[in-house]
Image (cartoon, rainbow, N blue to C red):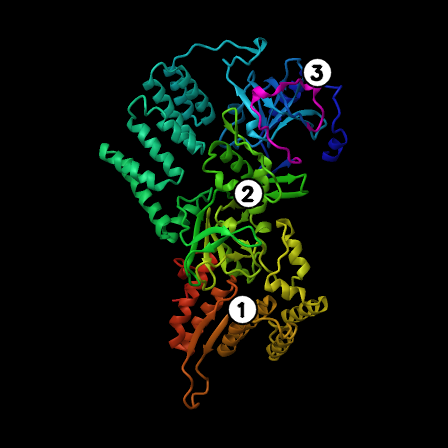
Amino acid sequence: MHDTAQLRKGQLVHDHPPPYMITAKSVAMKMSLNMSLPSKNTFITQLPSPYYPSDHSVDELQPICIRQMRLEQHHRGAKVIIRVLTPPSRINAVTVAVEDLEGTAVTLQLYHHPPQVVVSPDEIIQMGRVLLLKEPFFKCATDGSYSLRVDHLSDVIWLEPSDARIPDVWKKSVPEMSSEEARMQGNDAVKRQRWAEAMDLYSDAIRYAVSPREAQLAFVNRSLVNLKLGRFEQALLDATCTKEDVLPTEKALFREIRALYELQSFERCRERLQQFIETYPDNSDAHREMKRVEVRLQESHDGLYSFAGHMYKEARRKSAVTDSASFSKNVEVRGAPGRGRGLFTVQAVRAGDLLLCEKAFIYKYCDMDSGHCSILMDLHEKRAFAGGQAEILTQAIQNLYHNPEMSRPFLQLHHGNYRPVAQERADGNPIVDSFLAAKIISLNVFGAPRTSRKKLSHVLKNGKDEGDEKSVFGTAGIWIKASYVNHSCVGNCRRSFIGDMLILRATADMESGTELVFPYRHPTELESYDDVQRGLRHWGFVCDCALCRARRATPAAQLNKRQQLMEALKNIIHKPETNALARGVKLLNDLKRTYPAQYSPEQPRLELRSACFSMAMEYFHRGDLRKTVEMLLQGLGALGYKLTSVWPSADRAAARPPAAQFEIERWGVADDMVPWALVNLHGISKSIAPSLSQRILEYAYTAYSMVVGEDETFLQTFPTGE
């Protein structure tokens, strides 16, 4: 349908249906949607080719009518005034039938408004409402009908009933109402959780106010609605805007405190709370809020978190959004030669140290097993996204429009060759480019499990990784600071997740000023150089890390031989025959020889890793603990670990055996199986090398924290690791 529409690009339309047909179709759609939806459904949104938002004020634009519009074009320099003819319906866009002053009717599609669970469509737009569309986009819809599509929130001017720009023929009498009456109706809407309706009524109460005190009451109530809708900057403004005219009330001061908290201005929030408690010492809510703020400040200043006691509990919520603060004192963004900008350490760190614990700017947890799925189809890039990544675009656009200052760091993220409009505001509102937001998301989004600990449990149960995050997890988010970490197939840090918190820990000892890197896609077994580069193509660079150079030097025949040996090893390793393990050792040695002699020991050999760990498990089941240790150590070595490992000899008669020793001199890849390997070494050491037991256990704790983000739940995951 997209290609068919493009064939008509630039055409004038001469077959507009009469208005009654457009309205009847719109009403029929609403009726069908009001019927019960199936328990499982998929919602598909098509993102058209990018077009810029209008950066003109509405007064700079010339009127146009619908019959003058050409299909698949954006009518630059023009504006159209339209009136809503039908109640709205919603699947992906808020959809109504509209007409212009000549009586030509089409469908209007409004994208990127709050989801229906937050604001119902009839609160967003109502019959008889009059709108101005700036530089409208006229298109042929997927069903062949004609529509006006609005992707940019800032391209719509919502006219109030008393606005002089509404033509006389469309004007309606506005019922007389006092500020108090409007405010009481707003209070009733709040009780029914109709937030957008309450917003309009409190705005009416502000306009009708005849005294500063009356205005303050309406502003403070509207502040609550803005808090509920996530519009924290406006909530703060509403709570404080009447300070010059009238003394703030207790409720106004507390709304200011709540807005500061949600804006993560915890220092200012504590200051205002201290003043508030001095004035209102009996306010129990303020004392509870002070406890919360003190915890957030401890988190943000010192990186001290209650992972097991607080964060995991919060992450079990349906939204998986936690009440936590970001910690970033150990890192900073700076220029990275040849790579734009990057994230760097500001002090020396040890493997396992916390580098960053960051709250998501936008985040959506999606349960892919629920049967409900959103899909975003980017027609220009010919790519599709499912689950959270399809849904966070609207979150980002709403934030950009309603929290513009809070959203500035998002706009500074890498956006490829997309050139944003220069102007920031028009008609008193932020200019929001939805396609810029989509581009930023596509280049900076992280897929995530609800918790990395849950993902690790899956790996331990199934003996293998779940694969590439984006293809597995419906959940997605944008973490601003973490987005500056550049790519390397073998990183020096690892990200993990607890709800909407991204935790970044060092996986190597690093000096101050070291650039942090991690893989954008996790290396997998038997990947060729070309496989890897294809997987990275979307980000617009070619990886030339040491591992990729080694891949490039590996002939296809060698890779095929590796695959054959792995298959052969897998087929015999668990067989009960007495010589199966001996045959496995021979195959393992053959597998080692597929890596050239110049292959650096620092570079991971993933195929060896899995083979060694599989052999270790089989030796353990057969009761050969020393061979188990040997295979576990070889597996760690295959991941790039440099170990000093001396275990007591089995020969008790040996003269003067060397002292037992276990040290990780250089950490390798923080693979999911590393904590498991170290826990097994710890368990065996208790039998044959007790002096090594505590040291290995400490390493296991560190490796666990790298993989899941914390070590507080170590004994819950590995109850035998005591």
Q: Position of residue 383 (x, y in %)?
A: 66, 44
Q: Nearer the viewer, residue 527 or 334?
A: 334
**In this figure, which residue is indicated by the disc labeled 1?**
640
Circle on res. 18: 3
Check disc 2 and report the residue beneath it: 388
Comes first in the chain, label 1 or label 3: 3
Q: Amino acid at mark 3?
A: Pro
Q: Can residue 338 be found in the magenta stretch?
A: no
Residue 662 horizontal side relative to residue 581, left or right: left
Residue type at numbered disc 1: Gly
Q: Quadrant of residue 195?
A: top left
Quadrant of the rendering where the C terminus is positioned: bottom left
Judged from the image, the secondary structure of the residue bearing numbered disc 2 is helix
Residue 281 visible in the shown view: no
**From the viewer's perspective, is residue 117 above or below residue 446?**
above
Under tag 1, what secondary structure?
loop
Mark 2 surroundings within 10 Å by alpha-carbon count, few (fewer than 14), some (14 through 19), many (20 or more)? many
Q: Magenta segment, which residues?
A: 48-73
Of labels 1 and 2, the one closer to you: 1
The percent coordinates of residue 427 (x first, y second) are 52, 24
Comparing 551 with 223, the one in front is 551
